[in-house]
Amino acid sequence: MAAKITVEQVQAAVRRFFELMSAKIPGEIEKMYSHDSSVFNPFTQRSEPGRLSAARREREYFKPEAGYRAEITGSIEVQILADKVAVAAHTMRSFGTNLEEPTLGKRFNRTVQDGRGTHIFILDSEGRLLIAHQHISDIFRAPLEPVK
C-alpha cells in the first residue's frame, strides 16, 4: 500500500522549516521545496520559485553576523486534501537581526510581530514530504530598525 500523508508529518515539517532557518544550515531549506514550488512572502513584490526563495533567504539570514528566530504562536492546523496532499496553516512571529541591505551597505533588524503561514505539502514518490506552495504574510510588521 502506498504511503499517505499524516497530520503529524505535516506539523513536524512546518516546525522543521523554522528550525532549519534558525540553525542556518546551507542547502537544507532548499531541500524542503518541490522542484516546481512557489512562494509568497511579505518582503517580495511577487511570488518566486521555492528553491530560489530558499537561496535568497540563505543570502539574507545565513551570514555569520546575522540571526534568525521564529516562534509558531498557535496550533498548526492541517487539512488532508488527498492521500499525498495537505495544507497547513499557523500563526507566527519572527526576528531577523543584523541583516544587511546590500545596495546601501546598511544593517537592520526585521521583526514580524504577528504573521501567518500557509503551506501546501505533497508526498513525493520517494516518500519525502515537500512544500509545493508556501505563503507567509505579516499581520503586523514592526518598522525596520537600523543596527547601530
Image: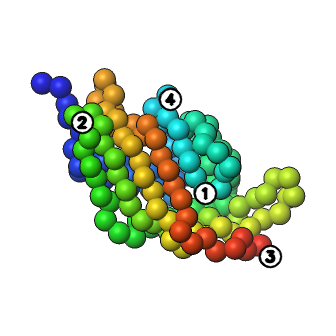
Residue in view at x 31 percent, y 23 percent? 125
**Camera-nearest residue between 47 and 10:** 47
Q: Is mark 3 on a helix, strand or loop?
A: loop
Residue holding disc 1: 42
Marks 2/3 in contact by CB < 8 Å: the verdict is no
For disc 4, the marked residue is 36
Type of residue at label 4?
Asp
Q: Where is residue 103 in the image (x, y as percent from the top left)?
A: 86, 52
Instruction: Please say if the residues under marks 1 and 2 sit with CB atoms less than 8 Å apart.
Output: no
SS class, disc 2: strand
Q: Distance of mark 2 from mark 3, alpha carbons?
A: 50 Å
Q: Which of marks 3 and 4 is nearer the N terminus?
A: 4
Identify the mark nearer the N-term, 1 or 4.
4
Q: Please indicate, yes or no, whether residue 94 appears anywhere in the rendered image.
A: no
Residue holding disc 3? 148
Q: In the image, 8: left or right of 116?
A: left
> Distance between the Cα atoms at labels 3 and 1?
25 Å
State the separation of the CA atoms marked 1 and 2: 29 Å
Image quarter (top left, top right, bottom left or bottom right) of the C terminus: bottom right
